[in-house]
Structure formats: C-alpha cells, structure tokens
Image (cartoon, helix red, strand yellow):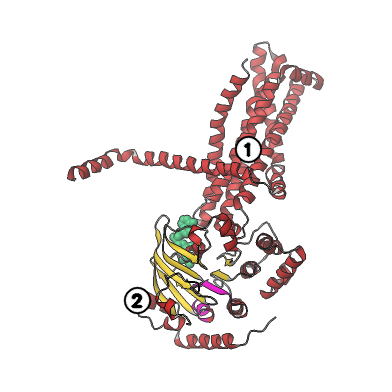
C-alpha cells in the first residue's frame, strides 16, 4: 500500500514540466469529442423535417449576402496579385501565354476555396460564436428549450445549412472576380484582350480543376457553422465567455479547414490522377 | 394544512401529495453547487427561495424544468419524475410550468408579440385569432400592450422583465417559476410585479417559486421561505418565522438586507391588504 502511494507520487512529480502540455492535448481531445457529438446531432436533425426555412433564409442573408463585398475585394486582389507575382517567372520560362490558365487553376483549385473559407471562418465563425454565446449567456437558449422550440434545430441547423450553401456560392463568385482581377492586370501589363483571356482559360481549365475546389467548400462551410455554433452553444462564464467563444470559433475552424484541405487535396489527386 | 400526514412525510408518494417535490438534489459543475437540497411546493402555494449570489437558486429552477440534470436526487411534479422524463414528456411538462428567466431571455430577433406567440404556437392548439387575444391580454396584465410590435432591444430593463413575465404567463401555466422577478427594478415597478404575482396566485391558484434577493418582495408574495446556503437548505418554514430563526447565516443575511422592524411591519400590513382584497376579475 505504502509503496503504491510512493510510486504514484513519483509519477506525479516527475513529468511536472510536461503535464500542462498533456493537459492541453487532453482538453483538445475532449473538445474534438464534443464537437463530433455536436456534428452528429446535425445528421439526426437532418432526418427530422420540417426545417425552419424562414430562419435559413434569414441566416443566408446574414452569412452570405453580408459577406459579398468582402469576398469580391478578396477575390479581385487574389487574381491581380497572383498575376503580378507570377509574370516575371513565367516570362523567364517563356511561358507568359500560360499566365491566365495558371492563375485560373491556382485560384480555382486552392487559393479561392481556402482563402475565402479561412477569411469567412474569421468573419462568420466568430460572428456565430458570439451570437450564440450571448444567447447562451442571456438564457435565450434555455428559454427556447422551455418554449419547446428545439434550439439545435432553430439555431444550429439553420446556421450550418446557411454556411454550407453560402460558402460554395461565395467561392464561385470569388473565382469569377479573381479572373477579372487577373485580366485587368494582364490588360494593363501586356494588353491582352478579354476574348483571348477567356479562350485561354476555357481551353486550359478542366472540370477536375473546378469542381473539387467548389465541392470542398461545402465541407468548409459545414466546419465554420458547426464550430461557431458549438463554441457559442457551450459558451460559459457570461459576457466574458462570449468573447472567448468568438475567438475560439475563428481559431478552431480556420485550423480545421487547413487540416481538412490536406485531406481533400489527397482525395482529389486520387480521384483525378494526372 | 389539510394533510398533516404529508407535512410529516413529504417523501411519501401519494395522490394528494405536494405539487412539486425536490428530494435530496445534488449537482456540481466545476465546484459542487447543490449538495443535498429538498423542498416541496403545495398547490396554490408561493414559496420564496432566498440565498446569496451563486448559491444555486437559478440552478434549482432549471433543474425543476429539466434544463439541467442533477447528479443525484429526484424531482417530482404531480408524481411525474422530472428527472426521468424524455424530451417529449419534458415538452408537455414545460407547457404546464411558466418560467421567468433572471434576464427575461426574450428572443432578440423577434418582436414582443412574436416572443409570446411562439410559446402559444408550441404549447397550445389555438388559432391565430385566439392567440392574438391571449397575447394582448397577457401584455395588458403587465401594462405593455403598446409594446407588442417593439423589439426587445427597444425596451428598458424593467419593461423586458415585464415582457418576459407576460411571455411566461401567456401559456396559462399551473405553476410559475420566477427568477428574480423584481431585482434591478425601481420600487414602483417592483411592487406592481409583486402585486401581479399575488394576483396570479389568488385569481388562478397558480403555485409559484419566487427566487429573490429582495426581502420586501419575498414578504409581499410568499407564504413560505426556503433559504439556501452552501448547497443545503438551512431554513424551510413560514415567512413569519424567518425573523425568529437564530441560524447565524440567516441572521447576518437578514440584517445585511436592512429590513428594519418598522419597514417589515409596513410590508406585512401591505401584504395583508393585498392578500385579503377579493380578487377582482379584470
Ligand atoms: N450551466 C452551468 N455550467 C457551469 N456552471 C454553472 C452553470 N449554471 C450555473 N453554474 C454555476 O453554479 C453556481 C450557481 O449558479 P446560479 O446561477 O444558480 O446562482 P444564483 O444563486 O442564481 O446566483 P444569483 O443570485 O447571482 O443569480 C455558479 O457558481 C455558477 O457559475
Ligand atoms: Mg440566479
């Protein structure tokens, strides 16, 4: 008995420097477990119509429509900057004719889906985290339960669905305006005509460059929505917790998006080998 | 009073038992909040729950409607075991119990009218005309009939509280749980809400639990008081016996709330008037 006590003390004493680290990993695992359960509830809710369509439309407006100008600015800048940056190198290899295709493929496959998603994880994810967090703090979520109004269905499901619709649409828009940005730079720097630019893009870009990039943003949208709602829904500590929920929502969903992207790129390359 | 037997054995299940029984509840979050708390509420009775901030008064109310689950102990409402109900059964329980949240908890994306309507839609089968009538009536009771189309953000704190009160009584509950109904309100609004609680109790025979810091409110509305401290019920008895208790915490609590003898008597006199006045149907 005494020996046991001693050894357990020794175990506790030695990795003292490590234990906060271990604790942090453990709490991350707990977080992921909770997040997984929370996401599974989405599937269960999906199986239980009717849905709150009015609320979904309201969220689409708040999440999608209000992000339009941000997405347009970011899209144009991505296209323009990428074109400017790649011109010297492409000229060096005598490949300036391929600039439009190269820009289009980079933008559609990777840049626009991931950048737009990460930026919206900041704007939309944090917004959802703060909104649901303050609803939790002001007991509105409890009040919904009391009103027999399923708060998951009403608050979480609608926001996640809105994100899953808004993200691909915004990404397509970003793809489009990025090409416009790219063309403007091409026009100013090399006097390339719009019809040449369009031809060159249409000839060079394939279905497999375009579709996976848009498709993965549906999952990124899901991630932003679910993480934002999860953080807000489980917000603790009143008003102070609201800020924490917002920050955690943005950080966690950005990180998950980048990790998921690695997985999606792998899958895309397996499905459409070059 | 008619069932002395149940006074002695509140745990004994029986058809004519109390409306609500909370038995040996324990619940912990980061720290233990409730360690072993029991209480009962009989039909038509108003019980005040007193205690310092953070002693778990709000938690107690949330346990009663199944928003939180106790780690140990049981809660019975009309011999239904709340702690064992599934979601559907909880829904029907919640259509019988009105809940006034501490911060009113109005849904900010809806008007006051829509806030009330939502509860009626989910908890009753009334058509829109009948619902409208009930909504107007409930808002009239709290003198907010002109705010029906306003958003919660346009209301003052006291108005929000009253709107929250209207929302919790619009479903015509059999029992009301008030979480700090008068805290942070001016004395006039405060006493008008206290009067409303008494009216509801007298006119409709609604049983209530009133969580409050505000002793004048407690004296005005309640028949009985429960005092929570450190996870235990340290006082359970007649409102009138509260001042007589020699529990050191309770003495300190009462003296800190500065309810001197004179004021105490005034409130009690006002209470007598309020309770004896025949209920006037509006
Ligand atoms: N859902 C929850 N998760 C974690 N902790 C909680 C939760 N609800 C309440 N608590 C904790 O339980 C304790 C009691 O809270 P409660 O809100 O019941 O206090 P109270 O008696 O109503 O206080 P006040 O008079 O200030 O309203 C507090 O320490 C609070 O932090
Ligand atoms: Mg409270």
Residue furthest front as drawn: B15
**Label for residue A202?**
none
**Where residue A71 sits in the image (x, y, percent)?**
69, 37
**Label for residue B248?**
2
Please tell me whether residue A172 is drawn above or below residue B194 in the rendered image. Answer: above
Quadrant assignment for the C terminus of chain A: top right
Residue furthest left as drawn: A2
- Judge left or right: residue B129 versus residue A32: right
Q: Secondary structure at mark 1?
A: helix
Q: Between residues A91 and A142, which one lies in front from this camera angle? A: A142
- Specify whether tag 2 is near ligand 1 (CB below 8 Å): no
Q: Between residues A41 and A135, which one lies in front from this camera angle? A: A41
Q: Which residues are magenta?
A: B205-219
Quadrant assignment for the N terminus of chain A: top left
Mark 2 to mark 1 CA distance (whole Å): 58 Å
The quarter of the picture where residue B206 lies is bottom right
**Where residue B129 sits in the image (x, y, percent)?**
77, 66
Q: Residues within 10 Å of mark 1 (few under 14, many from 20)?
A: many
User: What residue is shown with label 1?
Assistant: A221
For image coordinates 32% across by 39% down, the residue present is A17
Chain where mark 1 sits: A
**Where residue B264 sits in the image (x, y, percent)?**
48, 85
Q: Secondary structure at mark 2?
A: helix
**Where residue B1 sits in the image (x, y, percent)?**
47, 82
Q: Magenta span has B117? A: no
Residue furthest top as drawn: A94
- Judge left or right: residue B275 versus residue B261: right
- Judge left or right: residue A256 versus residue B148: left
The quarter of the picture where residue A76 lies is top right
């Amino acid at each position: 008995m005494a020996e046991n006590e001693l050894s357990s003390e020794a175990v506790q004493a030695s990795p003292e420097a490590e234990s906060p680290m271990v604790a942090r990993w453990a709490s991350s695992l707990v977080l992921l477990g909770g997040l997984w359960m929370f996401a599974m509830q989405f599937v269960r809710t999906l199986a239980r119509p009717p849905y709150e369509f009015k609320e979904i439309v309201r969220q689409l407006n708040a999440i999608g429509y209000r992000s339009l100008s941000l997405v347009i600015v970011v899209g144009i800048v991505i296209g323009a900057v990428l074109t400017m940056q790649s011109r010297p190198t492409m000229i060096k290899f005598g490949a300036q004719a391929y600039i439009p295709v190269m820009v289009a493929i980079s933008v559609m496959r990777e840049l626009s889906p991931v950048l737009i998603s990460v930026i919206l994880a900041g704007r939309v994810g944090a917004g959802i985290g703060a909104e649901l967090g303050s609803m939790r703090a002001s007991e509105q979520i409890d009040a919904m339960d009391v009103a027999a109004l399923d708060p998951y269905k009403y608050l979480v499901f609608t926001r996640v669905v809105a994100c899953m619709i808004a993200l691909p649409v915004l990404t397509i828009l970003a793809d489009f305006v990025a090409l416009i940005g790219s063309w403007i730079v091409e026009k100013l720097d090399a006097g390339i005509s719009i019809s040449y630019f369009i031809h060159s893009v249409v000839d060079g870009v394939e279905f497999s460059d375009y579709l996976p990039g848009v498709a993965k943003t549906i999952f990124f949208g899901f991630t932003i929505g679910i993480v934002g709602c999860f953080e807000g829904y489980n917000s603790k500590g009143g008003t102070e917790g609201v800020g924490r929920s917002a920050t955690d929502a943005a950080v966690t969903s950005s990180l998950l998006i980048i990790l998921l992207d690695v997985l999606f790129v792998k899958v895309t390359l397996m499905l459409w080998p070059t | 009073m008619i069932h002395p037997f149940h006074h002695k054995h509140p745990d004994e299940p029986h058809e004519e038992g109390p409306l609500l029984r909370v038995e040996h509840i324990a619940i912990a979050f980061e720290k233990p909040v409730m360690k072993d708390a029991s209480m009962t509420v009989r039909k038509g009775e108003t019980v005040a729950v007193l205690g310092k901030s953070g002693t778990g008064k709000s938690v107690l109310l949330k346990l009663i409607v199944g928003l939180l689950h106790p780690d140990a102990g049981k809660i019975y409402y009309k011999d239904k075991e709340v702690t064992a109900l599934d979601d559907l059964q909880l829904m029907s329980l919640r259509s019988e119990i009105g809940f006034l949240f501490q911060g009113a908890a109005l849904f900010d994306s809806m008007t006051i009218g829509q806030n009330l309507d939502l509860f009626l839609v989910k908890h009753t089968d009334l058509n829109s005309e009948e619902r409208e009538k009930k909504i107007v009536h409930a808002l009239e009771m709290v003198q907010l009939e002109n705010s029906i189309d306003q958003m919660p953000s346009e209301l003052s704190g006291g108005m929000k509280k009253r709107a929250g009160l209207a929302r919790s009584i619009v479903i015509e509950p059999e029992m009301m749980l008030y979480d700090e109904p008068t805290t942070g309100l001016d004395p006039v609004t405060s006493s008008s809400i206290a009067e409303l609680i008494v009216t509801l109790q007298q006119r409709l025979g609604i049983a209530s639990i009133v969580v409050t810091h505000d002793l004048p409110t407690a004296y005005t509305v309640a028949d009985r008081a429960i005092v929570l401290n450190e996870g235990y019920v340290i006082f359970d008895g007649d409102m009138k016996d509260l001042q007589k208790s020699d529990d050191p915490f309770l003495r300190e609590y009462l003296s800190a709330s500065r309810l001197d003898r004179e004021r105490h008597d005034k409130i009690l006199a006002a209470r007598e008037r309020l309770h004896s006045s025949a209920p006037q149907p509006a």
